[in-house]
Image: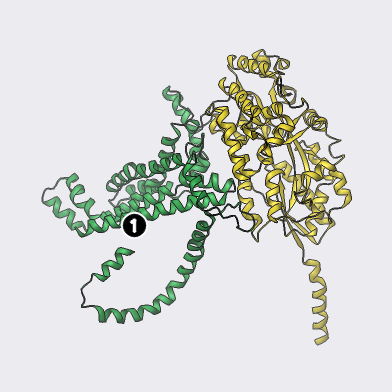
Chain colours: A green, B yellow
């Protein structure tokens, strides 16, 4: 938002009179359209945020009035908690996998599937299906796939003659297993964003390049990818914030186990804050996560703004 | 015309109150269809006798129930009656004022039926009665006789800890999984630690530690309990992939005859069948209960049992009708049906008399004769300390933590919440 405001201020000074007129008219539109979203946003986002921030300074088990002020003790407890480091590490791995594997894969599929035809539409739908599936359902399906006794994985292992590990019970394999599910689940979403971007590229540009004898991969490299930059900006942003808030898939898959090795920041919050009825502790985790997300969002905007200007 | 209209209105007014039913929302965690059918049957009988009361039976799965209850109890959607395992969680609810004291409403007859133990289990720290006990349960060492025979292990040789470890090794050498465990849920693992503590520290030791006296849970007996647990874990006695197995998975594994033993509550008799691939589970003549091995020098009484004393609590807004319903449901006559169908062992006097299932009869006797019936530790110690007990138990089962560290973590959690 900051950069948008900065952008209008920097606009040439010929417009002010016209703008003032526009403002008066837009007031009416504001009065009609703003309250619903403002109220919803306040009730379901801002107030809970303030609540959580308040809890984080108290020792509270969720019942009765909040009275036991403990200052920054909850923050200290979170930062020194034996499993918090693992949770942060896992969340960062999810961010990295999203950016380095999921998005390139989505881009590759998008470029391959951006033509309009019936067959391609079918493929596109198939790739997009996992995204439409509820997270918990996806988690349960993959729990069955990975199940070492009755699952799909040991069957595959048997046919190729390799003994498969119980991936969800293994402290090492559990992370790659979760990453596979996340990539499978979300790459279709990013693929769709990229496809929409690719389809908005005027066909004349591509055609002209083709007539000039530009090779296929060069078209991709120098025309298509630069022209869907704004779609990529959105995708990267969603990928990062989504990864930081990952929760629903982990709970049915592993519940953070084995030995708390597969917690993300949010499942950590749920396990140690909510289930243990230490809401102040949970509040502190959520405030730290919120700060991280805000920092990422602001830094991201700033970097982009700089890139846009050059 | 006016008179007719007036008469009609009066008539309506007279009829209306009769239709205004009191709704009793009874939140339960029963997942076995046949047991739910018995509950529905009881509801139908109760509603027929009390047309002004309507009983609803919303359901929440075990883990979801625990997670949601705190919020639920403080919302407008709070159930009138809900399941409780008693102990620390119940005390926190009582202290927070989200429960309704019912000692003046519950009839003397209903109190008498559940006995002193049943009343005191649901009496809060402030001396008020907040609920009624329904059933007792015990964590026992279930074993599969056929697999023991196949491995050539004499069940009697497993009465001591050393004998038990040797037996586990023999079973494993015979290519059979000695023990099933649902370590993903963690609480099944905490039964091992708890049973060892019951043997080693006994009632006095445990209660002193829970009060934070002396070294508390970092004391010698508790470290020793961790050490014994690690001795067992070192044999790798669990089914493959146990760390990702939930209780239901482990129960089914045992029910399918793939593991020789399962340390679990008496309720597993039904759940094991329900979770087995054939839905039949292990036939009665192949199933047995082993006494938990005794430990030399342990301070616990050999008769001590570990388990539950569960029941129903009344929430703040519960009506008198809710109490009336629970009294009916908890009567010996209704509870006897659940006993006869082997779902649980009712606490109501006389309800368990008709029980013929030898396992349930044995468990009822064990609890009746117990010097100390220890309440599930994760419930007795409350959600925070109990949660840590569950954590360290899952770690110890995976041989991923030292006994000293485990003991200190529990002490730390207890110090933290005091």
Camera-side residue of A168 and A147: A168
Side (left or right) of B296 relative to A124: right
Camera-side residue of A234 and B340: A234
How far across and down, in percent of the image, does residue A116 sit? Answer: 29, 52
Is the residue marked by circle 1 packed among few (<14), some (14-19), or many (20+) residues within 10 Å? Answer: some
B67 up-or-down from A201: above or below: above
Q: In this rendering, does residue B394 appear at all? A: yes
Circle 1 — which element? helix
A210 up-or-down from B218: above or below: below
State which chain disc 1 sits on: A
How far across and down, in percent of the image, does residue B206 sit? Answer: 70, 34
Camera-side residue of B88 and A251: B88
How far across and down, in percent of the image, does residue B214 sit? Answer: 66, 34
State the quadrant of the N terminus of chain A.
bottom left
How far across and down, in percent of the image, does residue A170 sit? Answer: 48, 30
Tell me which residue sits at (87%, 52%) in the image.
B107
- The quadrant in which residue B165 appears is top right
- The quadrant in which residue B366 appears is top right
Q: Residue furthest bottom?
A: B2
Q: Residue furthest top?
A: B152
Q: Which residue is mark 1?
A: A298
Side (left or right) of B248 relative to A49: right
Q: Residue furthest left?
A: A212
């Amino acid at each position: 938002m900051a950069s948008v405001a900065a952008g209008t201020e920097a606009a040439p000074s010929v417009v002010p009179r016209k703008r003032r007129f526009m403002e008066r008219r837009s007031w009416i539109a504001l009065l009609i359209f703003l309250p619903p979203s403002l109220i919803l946003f306040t009730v379901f986002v801002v107030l809970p945020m303030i609540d959580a921030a308040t809890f984080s300074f108290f020792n509270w088990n969720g019942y009765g009035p909040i009275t036991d002020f403990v200052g920054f003790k909850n923050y200290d407890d979170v930062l020194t908690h034996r499993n918090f480091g693992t949770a942060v590490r896992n969340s960062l791995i999810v961010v990295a996998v999203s950016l380095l594997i999921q998005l390139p894969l989505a881009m590759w599929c998008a470029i391959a599937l951006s033509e309009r035809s019936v067959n391609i539409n079918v493929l596109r739908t198939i790739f997009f299906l996992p995204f439409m599936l509820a997270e918990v359902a996806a988690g349960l399906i993959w729990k069955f796939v990975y199940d070492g006794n009755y699952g799909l994985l040991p069957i595959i292992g048997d046919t190729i003659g390799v003994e498969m590990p119980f991936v969800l019970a293994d402290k090492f394999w559990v992370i790659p297993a979760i990453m596979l599910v996340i990539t499978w689940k979300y790459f279709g979403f990013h693929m769709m964003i990229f496809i929409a971007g690719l389809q908005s590229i005027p066909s004349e540009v591509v055609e002209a390049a083709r007539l000039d004898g530009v090779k296929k991969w060069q078209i991709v490299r120098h025309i298509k990818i630069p022209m869907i930059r704004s779609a990529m900006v959105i995708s990267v942003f969603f990928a990062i914030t989504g990864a930081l808030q990952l929760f629903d898939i982990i709970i049915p898959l592993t519940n953070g186990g084995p030995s708390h090795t597969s917690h993300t920041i949010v499942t950590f919050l749920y396990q140690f804050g909510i289930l243990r009825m230490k809401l102040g502790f949970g509040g502190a985790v959520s405030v730290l996560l919120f700060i991280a997300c805000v920092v990422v969002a602001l830094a991201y905007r700033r970097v982009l703004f700089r890139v846009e200007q050059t | 015309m006016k008179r007719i209209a007036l008469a009609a209105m009066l008539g309506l007014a007279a009829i209306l109150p009769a239709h205004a039913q009191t709704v009793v929302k009874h939140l339960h965690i029963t997942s076995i269809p046949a047991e739910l059918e018995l509950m529905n049957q009881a509801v139908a009988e109760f509603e027929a006798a009390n047309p002004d009361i309507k009983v609803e039976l919303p359901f929440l799965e075990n883990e979801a129930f625990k997670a949601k209850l705190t919020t639920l109890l403080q919302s407008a959607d709070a159930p009138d009656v809900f399941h409780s395992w008693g102990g620390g969680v119940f005390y926190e609810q009582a202290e927070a004022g989200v429960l309704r004291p019912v000692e003046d409403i519950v009839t003397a007859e209903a109190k008498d039926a559940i006995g002193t133990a049943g009343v005191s289990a649901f009496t809060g720290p402030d001396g008020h009665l907040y609920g009624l006990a329904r059933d007792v349960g015990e964590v026992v060492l279930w074993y599969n006789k056929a697999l023991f025979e196949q491995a050539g292990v004499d069940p009697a040789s497993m009465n001591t800890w050393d004998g038990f470890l040797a037996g586990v090794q023999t079973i494993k050498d015979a290519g059979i999984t000695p023990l099933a465990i649902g370590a993903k849920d963690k609480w099944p693992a905490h039964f091992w630690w708890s049973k060892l503590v019951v043997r080693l520290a006994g009632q006095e030791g445990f209660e002193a530690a829970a009060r934070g006296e002396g070294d508390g849970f970092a004391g010698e007996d508790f470290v020793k309990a961790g050490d014994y647990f690690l001795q067992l874990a070192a044999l790798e006695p669990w089914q493959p992939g146990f760390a990702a197995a939930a209780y239901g998975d482990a129960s089914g594994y045992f029910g399918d005859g793939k593991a020789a033993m399962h340390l679990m509550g008496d309720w597993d008799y039904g759940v094991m069948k329900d979770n087995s691939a054939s839905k039949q589970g292990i036939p009665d003549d192949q199933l047995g209960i082993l006494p938990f091995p005794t430990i030399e020098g342990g301070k616990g009484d050999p008769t001590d049992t570990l388990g539950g004393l569960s029941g129903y609590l009344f929430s703040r807004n519960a009506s008198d009708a809710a109490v009336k319903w629970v009294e009916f449901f908890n009567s010996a006559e209704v509870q006897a049906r659940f006993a006869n169908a082997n779902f649980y062992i009712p606490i109501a006097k006389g309800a368990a008399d008709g029980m013929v299932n030898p396992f349930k009869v044995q468990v009822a006797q064990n609890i009746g004769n117990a010097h100390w019936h220890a309440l599930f530790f994760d419930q007795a110690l409350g959600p925070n300390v109990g949660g840590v007990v569950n954590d360290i138990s899952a770690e110890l089962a995976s041989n991923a933590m030292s006994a000293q560290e485990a003991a200190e973590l529990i002490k730390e959690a207890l110090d933290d919440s005091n």
